[in-house]
Image (cartoon, grey):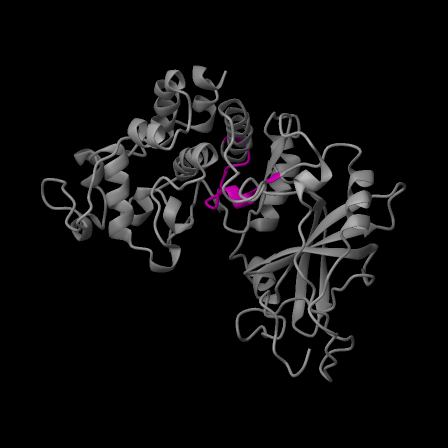
Amino acid sequence: MGGVDEPPEEPLLSTFEEGDGYFTAAAVGRSLKQYEFVRKLCWAASSSVWLGLDKAAETRTFVAMKILTSQATAKIVEGHSPEYDVFRSIEYTNPNSPGFNHCLTLRQCFIAGSAAGGHICFVTDALSSSLANLRSPGQNRFTLPIAKCKTKQVLLALDYLHRECRYIHTDLKSENILVSIPEPATSRIDEYLRANPPSVYGPPLNLNSLPLPLVFSCSQPLLYFSLCESIEDISVRLVDYSEATPIDNPGREHLRQPSVIRAPEITLRYPWTFTIDIWTVGCLLFELLTERQLAEQDYANYSHELHLQHIVERLGPFPPEFLKDCEERGKFFDEKGGLLHTNNDFAPCPLEDISRGLEAVDEKELPGTAGFLRRCLTLDPKLRPSAQELLKDSWLL
């Protein structure tokens, strides 16, 4: 690799002052404490995740190592992110809870140093694909029994997180629900690595500012269907608590949740709470069944107005009792509760109709499925059920 141009992954040359500060010493074959780097799994805006081999374990054991940027680490140290506290709460509150096994848990946590500063490293179990990329695009629909099973597992995780640990996830999406690797996990991973060795972008880059050459590693997640054959008995885990917030004192200073699945109370500046996670359970279930978003639009050109229009098209008008307490009501609704801004293709299409058109479920299953979706997507958050209440719904049983 010539010059200092970077490949299209995390900006390794971006500094703490520029808002990043990634850990630059990671590379296959190198070690951090007792963990040997085996493969880069993925990266995000505030971290990179690596597959590691625990050299201190009595038996051969693979782990995932989420290494935060120095910026993200500083936010935790300064008390602006509860990610570490969420991990600890999950670990110690009630490990016997049915939802505990569907939450990502912490094996170890430590701080590593680099030229960019300090980096918190969360060591967890190694997991495989997310529900978003379990299969190829166009082939990632789930049958109704499997979609029900995964929805129930997600609700168990949320029930534990909400009711016992007292946190709101706020970033629930298919990308943050990963599939566990069934036993024997180690031999499955070993076999996969032999067939799929790690890759890098170009040669290492030598910089005077770094003690080790900078290696630009490719993200290569552990693909579920290269590790396993059956989808029938998959078990999922809720991951990524970097955007979590306490139920008793939620941080409402900025817009939460991915834009296209955002609960309407956030957009409308209503004092939201844990039921925003329930809204996204409804969006998730719809995505699992259709491989489409409920309120689909272009991420790059996202519009609040179009988002609210799609919600009204799918679920009907917003209740006046809810709208009257929304700070941003006047920006989007007239005095009668009608939308102020709609495009020319405004076309009501209830859940039943759009599900039927997308052939999401059999006709006989449509009423029950649409009914459960409507419970998750209750427009008035005061009336939206909790995870515990939804787990008792006969549709899931």
- Left or right placement of residue 286 versus residue 123 in this view: left
* Residue 147 on the magenta span: no
Q: Is the residue 323 above or below the residue 252 in the image?
A: above
Q: In front: 142, or 184? A: 142
Residue 130 location, x and y as percent? 58, 42
Q: In front: 205, or 271? A: 205
Residue 115 location, x and y as percent? 69, 74
* Magenta-colored span: 163-178
- Left or right placement of residue 350 versus residue 4 in this view: left
Residue 107 location, x and y as percent? 73, 44
Q: Is residue 23 visible?
A: yes
Q: In front: 295, or 322? A: 295
Q: In front: 343, or 30? A: 343
Residue at image coords 10%, 40%: 336
Residue at image coords 37%, 48%: 260
* Residue 177 on the magenta span: yes
Q: Is residue 77 visible?
A: no
Residue 353: name its quadrant.
Answer: top left
